[in-house]
Image (spheres, rainbow, N blue to C red):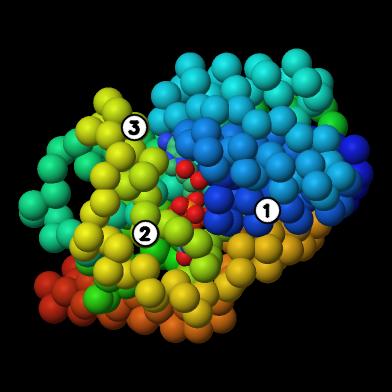
Amino acid sequence: MQNFQGKTAFITGAGAGIGLGMARTFARQGMNIVLCDIRREGLEQALGEINRLGAQALAVEADVSIKEQLERAAQQAFDAFGKVHVFCANAGVSMHGVPIEKLPAKDWEWVLGVNLYGVIHGFQIFVPHMRAHGEESHIVNTASIAGFRVTPGWTTGPYSMSKYAVVAISEALEQDLEGSNIGLSILAPAAVRTGIFHSGRARPPRMGGAFQRVESEQFAHRLDEGLAPDVVGERVLRGIRKGEFYIFTHNWARELVTERHARLQAAFDECEKWYEERGMEPPPR
Ligand SMILES: NC(=O)c1ccc[n+]([C@@H]2O[C@H](COP(=O)([O-])OP(=O)(O)OC[C@H]3O[C@@H](n4cnc5c(N)ncnc54)[C@H](O)[C@@H]3O)[C@@H](O)[C@H]2O)c1
């Protein structure tokens, strides 16, 4: 996608952090902005900021883990702006520092509900809309470097699980979008200076309501040196322009992925040896 002026972007989790960084970046390109978040107070502040940048903007409250709520929010955007050209499935919650054998079922449901189902609901609503209006469009699914490696030392199992799933579903969606004029990217940042470790503030009442997870918040300082959300916004803009599928933001993260791949390669070496030991031909592809 090349032309942004006068087009509309719909961003989930836009009441703070990376979502708001993308919103500011797109607003500076002359786009109309639809800010979607579960927290009303975040939305009000974000709307003020985007309006001050001179963009036409709308704030819609929705819990992305509930499809009907996202559908309602999307309808508000269609009513206000007609067409949505950029959809960013960005809302996400952290789930770090907790040994997985002790994590309550509700927390598994919450992290999958927001981080994975938020993405699924998003493309189920916006892909048919984009196909119908036919103009060049783009979808950005926010995963994480945690979607490519379960980083040692971060006790990040449930979060990583949800982000690996976002990567897999996006790789599948890329195949389904072949031949359309809808581009797709996976945003995979490492540390970004946001309040993600205070995600408990966004836990909805049906999941137990807002809370503070001390274990997760102990990780908060690790983001102090992280990238600014607007820099990530600029990175995403470049990715959309150039049609990048995987959008990485931190070069050092290459090492994490390389280590994982080396382990996988070694596992295939073992498989090859096993066939040799048995004197058997491996099955054809
Ligand atoms: N900050 C990082 O270092 C980092 C790194 C990699 C990936 N990410 C990913 O980036 C995305 C944005 O995270 P962030 O760092 O900006 O965090 P953030 O907490 O600053 O912003 C996330 C926003 O999502 C909203 N939200 C939470 N649950 C929601 C729901 N059910 N429905 C709608 N909105 C909801 C929150 O209210 C919040 O405003 C997430 O998907 C996160 O996993 C962040």
What residue lies at 36% left-to-right and 68% top-to-bottom? 220
- Secondary structure found at label 2: helix
- Residue 155 placement (x, y as % from top left): 23, 66
Q: Judge by depth and name the residue closer to the eye, 225 or 128.
A: 225
In the image, what residue type sits under mark 1? Answer: Met
Q: Inspect this view and state whether residue 12 appears.
A: no
Sort mark 1 into few (<14), some (14-19) or many (20+) by Cα contacts within 10 Å.
many
Q: Which mark is residue 204?
A: 3
Horizontal arrangement in the rendering, residue 273 relative to residue 15 (left or right): left
Which of the 4 quarters of the picture holds residue 98?
bottom left
Q: Are the residues tagged 1 and 3 within 8 Å (C-beta)?
A: no
What residue lies at 63% left-to-right and 23% top-to-bottom? 74
Ligand 1 neighbours mark 3 (CB distance < 8 Å): yes
Sort mark 3 into few (<14), some (14-19) or many (20+) by Cα contacts within 10 Å.
some
What residue did someone put label 2 on?
197
In the image, what residue type sits under mark 3? Answer: Pro
Question: How much space separates mark 3 and mark 2, taking CA atoms?
Answer: 16 Å
Q: Looking at the picture, does residue 177 appear above or below residue 92?
A: above
In the image, what residue type sits under mark 2? Answer: Phe
Question: How much space separates mark 1 and mark 3, taking CA atoms?
Answer: 24 Å
Question: How much space separates mark 2 and mark 1, taking CA atoms?
Answer: 19 Å
